[in-house]
Image (cartoon, coloured by chain):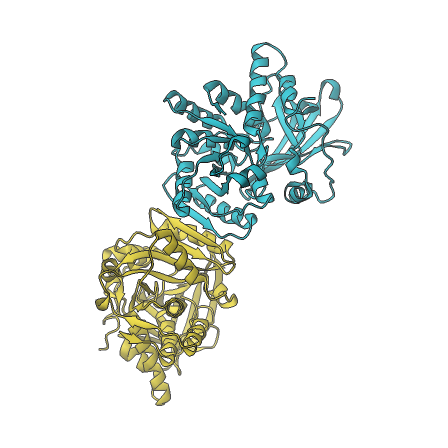
Chain colours: A cyan, B yellow
Amino acid sequence: MWDVTEEIIDALEIGAGILGTGGGGNPYLGKIEARQHLRAGKSIRVVSLDELPDDTFTTTVGGMGSPTVGIERVGRGDECVRAMRALERHLGRRFTHVIPGEIGGSNAMRPMIVAAQVGVPVIDGDGMGRAFPELQMDTFSIYGVAPTPGTLADPRGHEVVFDKIADPETLERYARAITIQMGGAAGYAFPPMTGEEVRRTAVPGTVTLAVEIGRAVLRARAALANPVDAALSVSGGQRLFHGKIVDVERRLLGGFARGVLQLEGSGGDAGRTLRIDFQNENLIARTNEGDILAVVPDLICLVDADSAEPITTEIVRYGLRVVVLGIPSPEMLKTPRALAVIGPAAFGYRDVPYIPLPGTYGVAD
Amino acid sequence: MWDVTEEIIDALEIGAGILGTGGGGNPYLGKIEARQHLRAGKSIRVVSLDELPDDTFTTTVGGMGSPTVGIERVGRGDECVRAMRALERHLGRRFTHVIPGEIGGSNAMRPMIVAAQVGVPVIDGDGMGRAFPELQMDTFSIYGVAPTPGTLADPRGHEVVFDKIADPETLERYARAITIQMGGAAGYAFPPMTGEEVRRTAVPGTVTLAVEIGRAVLRARAALANPVDAALSVSGGQRLFHGKIVDVERRLLGGFARGVLQLEGSGGDAGRTLRIDFQNENLIARTNEGDILAVVPDLICLVDADSAEPITTEIVRYGLRVVVLGIPSPEMLKTPRALAVIGPAAFGYRDVPYIPLPGTYGVAD
């Protein structure tokens, strides 16, 4: 159990950005909001899965929508709380905790803000250990938690409750259709989970991991050491490629930012090129020889070569000098059951086998 | 207060079809379902607005979706009951009555079926006195009943609750988006209304009117009299045109069947032509000289010239010999407040004034 400070929020912004693997939205606006709550005297407590009392009743809270819209449209700031309250009214029961649905990107910050607003602790874990583009791509769904009831709320005060939805893919379709009608961005709360369910299905310790990655980067910058090395030292990752962005193809398609990045190597990678396909998140990194350096669910993260600042799909552009990090996926995402939902084939790479990166998620060599 | 018989269901099918003004979906499948319930010993009671007890708590129930999909896709038959039950659970309160949202088309029959299934009476009235293509086009919304909470349910058991939606146009957009995701057809229940609200905002007596129109037609057929005259004698309507369908332009656009009918006159109308624009429902009837014979909200109804069988937008085709009936709209649809929502301008006819047909809705000359 630990309390969130401004320093921790700053670190979380960076760590969540890196674990976002290009997607998940920018945590910057959420950081500002969380900081305001701390400065106003609100407290945010983080508790580990082991510390959860038996009567724990929790849900994930966050923002749904294309990251591109999320950047441009600032909400009222209470969409997630209202989604959570709507779900509580529907269930006739209050939540004792909140948990991030995805630790990658802006949805790492949302539960912090809700925790400050309503006074419940944040659970140290999430449903992805990274970011993914669709609702059903989380360990809660994959390991059998019913996807509904769940709720959406928008800045105008509108609330929509989904119930008895047979499968998370259908919930994804329904919620995406409503999010588009809500203007492209909404706050969500789903699914309700007991302490037993969340202990069994969450990826543990990911809030701590994101904070530790960010902290390592910030300390290295302050010490004039190498921030990329620092990020690798706590994430369990490795350098995949070092180079320059030479081409960006990006389209908004079906509510997702899809496209391809081309990189030209420098340093030890001089003379090589790398192609990264993304759908909000980076999915596959291949050399010009066709060698696959990493593929989903392993994390493919672009960071600025000097500062280790995460580079998301929305801001990546020609000329940036980057390091491509490969971080092994959490073990819970590598089971056959999980790979059916978030493996290469689930993203259309039907002929690409999943060959895991060496190492362990979040564990330094 | 009166009880529904098989004869009444047969009559309602025809009357609701005529009042559907081309849209509202075909009541035929609903008639078969309602008849099965009656034959199984279920009873359906109809009560007038005057007879409602003070503690009345009611909602409209019906089907949402394009009539074209409604024809092709048969539901489980309990979508409306499940939508109603979901709304009751959301409110923590049981409904004492149901009321048709629109008396025109298939949604005249749905509350009958729900009444048989759950054992509550049907209120003799509705929110349109005819059919309209969108949710917000009803007297409940027009006269200030809050549009939500409301629910949708689909054949797979999925339920969606809409709450705190600021205006009925937004509910229409959200519900339409979900209906499309549900496969194009869903059962709805909304809005909850007290006895005072429904007495103040419903168009009264429209279930009786639809049944009386159908009865008059059936009796005339049996007596070898003129069924079209019979329909006019109880509806307050007049003959606008007599002729043959010579052209049908019809497209499915944004979930609606939109198009234009061309008619060539015969008998007293020989040498004249008529053009009718429709969006699910018939909206405006103009001669080749540009004279407007009738315009929404007045009812423009096509019936077979011999049998007075209603001819809907989905089945209208080249060569049919028809009479175009003009029935004056209920007075509640003629106020400035109502015309802003369901007058000619609301359907895009900005330069067309609403000049009411003579006569009174449902009152014979």
In the rendered structure, the answer to whether residue A215 lies left or right of residue A34 reads right
In the rendered structure, the answer to whether residue B223 lies left or right of residue B53 reads right
Q: Residue furthest right?
A: A289
Question: In this view of the protein, can residue B19 be seen by the observer?
Answer: yes
Question: In this view of the protein, can residue B352 be seen by the observer?
Answer: no
In this picture, is A226 found above or below B34? above
Estimate the x, y position of residue B191 in percent, counting from the top left.
Answer: 33, 56
- Tell me what residue is drawn at x 38 percent, y 34 percent: A76
- Tell me what residue is drawn at x 50 percent, y 41 percent: A194
Instruction: Pick the quarter of the image with the C terminus of chain B.
Output: bottom left
- Tell me what residue is drawn at x 36 percent, y 22 percent: A40
**B98 or A318, which lies in front?**
B98
Estimate the x, y position of residue A115 in percent, counting from the top left.
Answer: 43, 31
Q: Residue furthest front?
A: A54
Q: Residue furthest bottom?
A: B223
Estimate the x, y position of residue A295 in percent, counting from the top left.
Answer: 69, 35
**A199 or A341, which lies in front?**
A199
In the rendered structure, the answer to whether residue B190 lies left or right of residue A282 reads left
Instruction: Pick the quarter of the image with the N terminus of chain B.
Output: bottom left
Estimate the x, y position of residue B18 in percent, counting from the top left.
Answer: 36, 73
The part of the image, by quadrant, that contains residue B320 is bottom left
**B295 or A149, which lies in front?**
A149
